[in-house]
Image (tube, helix red, strand yellow):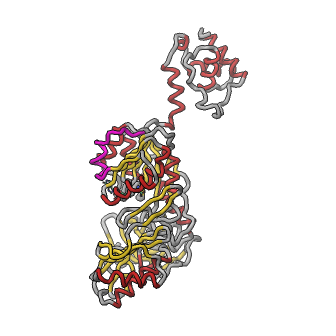
Amino acid sequence: MCVNDIYTVEISGMTDDGRGVGRAEGVAVFVPYALVGERVRIIIEVLKKNYAEARLLSVEEPSPHRTKSECPYFYECGGCAYWHTDYEFELEIKQRCVEDCIRRIGGIDCEVLPIIGCPSDRRYRNKASYKAEGGEVGFFAGRTHRLVPVSDCLLQTEQTNLAVNCIGDFLKESGSSGSTGSIFIRTLGDKVVAGIDSDIQAAKADELADRLRGVGVNLAGLLINGKLGYGNDRLTDKIGETEYSVSANSFYQVNIFQTKTLYDKVREFAALSGRENVWDLYCGTGTIGLYLASGAKRIVGVESIPSAVEDARENARRNGIDNAEYFCASAEAAAPKIRTKPDVVILDPPRRGCDKRLLETVAKSGAERVVYVSCKPSTLARDMKRLEQLGYTTLKACPVDMFPRTSHVETVVLLSKLKSKEHIYVDINLDELDLTKAEKKATYQEIKDYVLEHSGLKVSQLNIAQVKRKYGIIERENYNKPKSKNTKQPQCPPEKEKAIKEALGHFGMI
Ligand code: SAH
């Protein structure tokens, strides 16, 4: 295989950054804009030891899910990965990506719940970072410093697009657009904060603010080269009943429609009863912990960015939450020093995942449950594997699409130290450990074998336990009883009871 060779290949999979994967002469080839299930003509552009990268020349057999991109910038911009498919198929691809990572990288076979799609595949972002250059605003094309002018990004709100175009015009007119600058926009609760880094003078802030308001931008604040030039840089948002104040450079979930859904999933997995101490590590502005605080005994949050920690404390006050405290430190350094022992640990690290030492600290802390929120399936799977080696069992995972049309996907995972998957068996085996004299006479297996031989009936360990209890052989009341009154547990049918009773008699147990 050589660069510039042309092949026709079948696309058999997708990478986690949204490229199609095919094979030519046995070599894996990555093809942007090709979809799994398609036959495509490609030209090899990069040849590496174990794989090649190719450009799509034509689609010979399109996927039934292929669509015409509604975004005119899709093939240049590089910010999105999936404008060429219907949204349902994008969700399928993301589901499979999460499942594959957990299975292949994590080596874990767990339940992966169906991905929760976003109610809107566009206008969902509350945050944007643009580049300004030569009088144009837009984004750098993937892995380059070539500006692709974008005046209407479909992921952004109307307010963001309005603001960024207005700032672009302003920079152009004021002659400072020749220098490379960047524009940051955040929209929350209908208000906008804009930040500009360029050679524009701070004195121009009021003039620009007027312009922005003049074109209909609901401007709350303007930062120029990191300094507040107009208004204030805080925005507020409400998720469920919890209100958050967010400063310009603190992390905040970007999806306007899905954040509540994500946090509700975390709440469901955390399953708090009100008695738990919860560590909220990588807590940002305290969002997740504060969302859970009313159901917990105590929340301890750790975050490395000082302004985010201040936001977290302010957000606790704002919501009248007095059982949450925050530390500004790296999670790996702080965790071993936290005095409050956790019952539940929430992990929500950036893409690189968790520090190995932190996972060891979590495991040593004795936390019963870990709820891991991740925006990168591959590092998530790596960390899940480490947590499993440290004694946790993965119970379930649920992908949540926070980033429609891009290759990114969020996942919430529940891990437990109690090994709940095996819980029922553990309970039953305890009966054998807790032997009364009578019980020593025959094992469950011997009783089963006897019953099968003498009555032809297959009985379960549970059936035997029920009969034993009825005849007072098991003294400990709780074993094998339903966990709550509402739990349905099959009762031993009379003919089986009769056969088991006979076996117990045979072994001299009753
Ligand atoms: N849980 C929050 C934020 C998640 S983003 C939310 O849902 O809004 C990840 C956060 O981790 C960011 O705020 C980032 O500043 C912080 N962070 C990154 N590395 C860290 C580290 N080593 N220790 C603690 N926090 C870290």
Magenta stretch, residue numbers: 327-343
Determine which quarter of the picture holds residue 179: bottom left
Determine which quarter of the picture holds residue 146: bottom left
Q: Is residue 175 above or below residue 59?
A: below
Q: Can residue 1 be found in the magenta stretch?
A: no
* Along the line of sight, the residue nearer the viewer: 353 or 67: 353
Could you say where residue 455 lies in the image, as x and y percent from the top left?
A: 69, 20
Res. 103 visible in picture: no
Res. 37 visible in picture: yes
Direction from residue 508 to residue 330 in the image, left or right: left
* Along the line of sight, the residue nearer the viewer: 165 or 9: 165
Indicate which quadrant contains ligand 1.
bottom left
Could you say where residue 275 lies in the image, as x and y percent from the top left?
A: 47, 37
Residue at (56% x, 24% y) in the render: 479
Could you say where residue 500 lies in the image, as x and y percent from the top left?
A: 65, 18
Could you say where residue 92 lies in the image, as x and y percent from the top left?
A: 54, 61
